[in-house]
Image: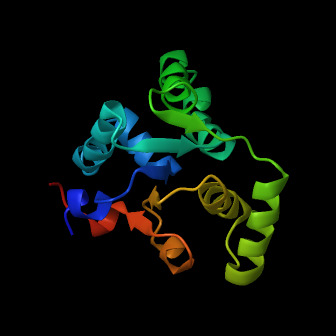
Amino acid sequence: MKATEALAGVTRALIDTAPLIYYIQRHARYFELCRIIFDRVDTGTLKAVTTPVTLAECLVMPYRDRSRELQEQFRNLIVFGMNTQFVPIDWRIADQAAQIRAVHAVELADAYQIAAAVVSGCDAFVTNDTRLKRIAGLPVIVLDDLEPG
């Protein structure tokens, strides 16, 4: 499926960790797909939702590598990006995450991400984790299922 087809009608999406890393680090295989997504964010066609989980996961390698520049790039995109909403984890998201874990037996970080998407009214969840497609109630867009265009 073409990326533009998968994103048709999506106006608000939680962007998971992998697409953000691929975009910032210009990943050879995934950058063009991610650029399509972030071009929509830049133009305001798509509102990106991010969380503290995303930020923490994206900052691990830049801290290990002591790359202040990369740390700032991730912070600027995830927390302060144009047309991006950084959603803190509150009791509603924690409660939803517990329900998701109870039904789907996913890792806590993944449950928080999906819960944040549901609670904040996202139309979709953009990831590259195929295991998350089995979670009902929210369309999951997996980069490996897409082709540019």
- Quadrant housing the C terminus: bottom left
Residue 141, horizontal then vertical, whole percent: 39, 64
Relative height, residue 5 to residue 100 (above, below): above
Q: Residue at x 33, y 41 (%)?
A: 45
The N terminus sits in image quarter: bottom left
Can you give x and y, in whole percent of width and height, for residue 100 in the image?
71, 73
* Horizontal relation, residue 20 to residue 148: left or right: right
Q: Nearer the viewer, residue 126 or 57?
A: 126
Q: Residue furthest top?
A: 68
In the image, residue 15 sits, relative to residue 136, either above or below, namely above
Residue for point 47% across, 42% down: 48
Task: Give the tally of numbered discs.
Answer: 0
In this rendering, would 91 be left or right of 88? right
Residue 66: % across, % down? 58, 21
- Tell me where residue 115 appears, x and y as whole percent: 67, 61
Corner quadrant of residue 61:
top right
* 148 on left or right of 120: left
- Quadrant of the rendered structure where residue 102 is? bottom right
Q: Nearer the viewer, residue 57 or 115?
A: 115
Q: Measuring 82% from the left and 63% from the top, which residue is drawn there?
A: 95
Residue lying at the far left in this picture: please name it.
149
Q: Is residue 49 above or below residue 9?
A: above
